[in-house]
Image: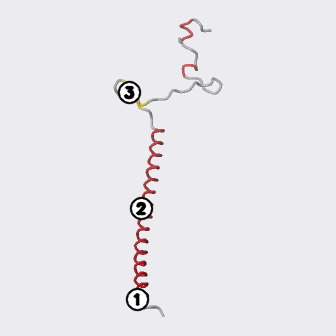
Amino acid sequence: MVDPEVQERIAVRRTELDDLEEQLVKQLAEVRAEREDLAAERVLARMGEQVAAERAATAPAVAQVGGKEVLHSPRRGRRSPRTSTPRPHERHGNHGSWAQATGTEN
């Protein structure tokens, strides 16, 4: 037969361990919730950075001209004569353009 004092000590220790387990379960739940909050904040920060980068990439460039802000209009690339339509000044001959001024008209 087991000594009643030993049984009492075992019962007390079991109660202490049950209380400790309950505290640790609560702490673990709090830690996990905080970790999820931090992960969500990182996701939001990363998405915010991506949106900002996309906006910066698509935003029109602004320049200063005469002390005023103006939108920068990118230059058009050279067009291949075979694939492009003539520009308005090229459609109906030169009409007093460079060819006449240099004496090279036909």
- Residues at marks 3 and 2, CA–CA distance in whole angstroms: 48 Å
Observer-side mark, 3 or 1, equals: 1
Secondary structure, mark 2, is helix
Residue at 45%, 46% (x, y): give it.
Answer: 49
N-term-proximal mark, 3 vs 2:
2
Observer-side mark, 1 or 2, equals: 1
> Is the residue marked by circle 2 packed among few (<14), some (14-19), or many (20+) residues within 10 Å?
few
Residue at 38%, 25% (x, y): give it.
Answer: 65
Q: Nearer the viewer, residue 83 or 38?
A: 38
Q: Amino acid at mark 3?
A: Gln
Q: Which residue is identified by label 1?
A: 5
Residue at 41%, 61% (x, y): give it.
Answer: 34
Residue 42 in the image: above or below residue 73:
below
**Contact, mark 1 vs mark 2 (Cβ under 8 Å):** no
Secondary structure, mark 3, is strand
Observer-side mark, 3 or 2, equals: 2
> Is the residue marked by circle 3 packed among few (<14), some (14-19), or many (20+) residues within 10 Å?
few
Secondary structure, mark 1, is helix
- The image shows residue 70 at horizontal and vertical percentages of 39, 29
Q: Nearer the viewer, residue 75 or 29?
A: 29
- The image shows residue 64 at horizontal and vertical percentages of 38, 27
Q: Which residue is identified by label 3?
A: 64
Q: Amino acid at mark 1?
A: Glu
Q: Which residue is identified by label 2?
A: 34
Q: Amino acid at mark 2?
A: Glu
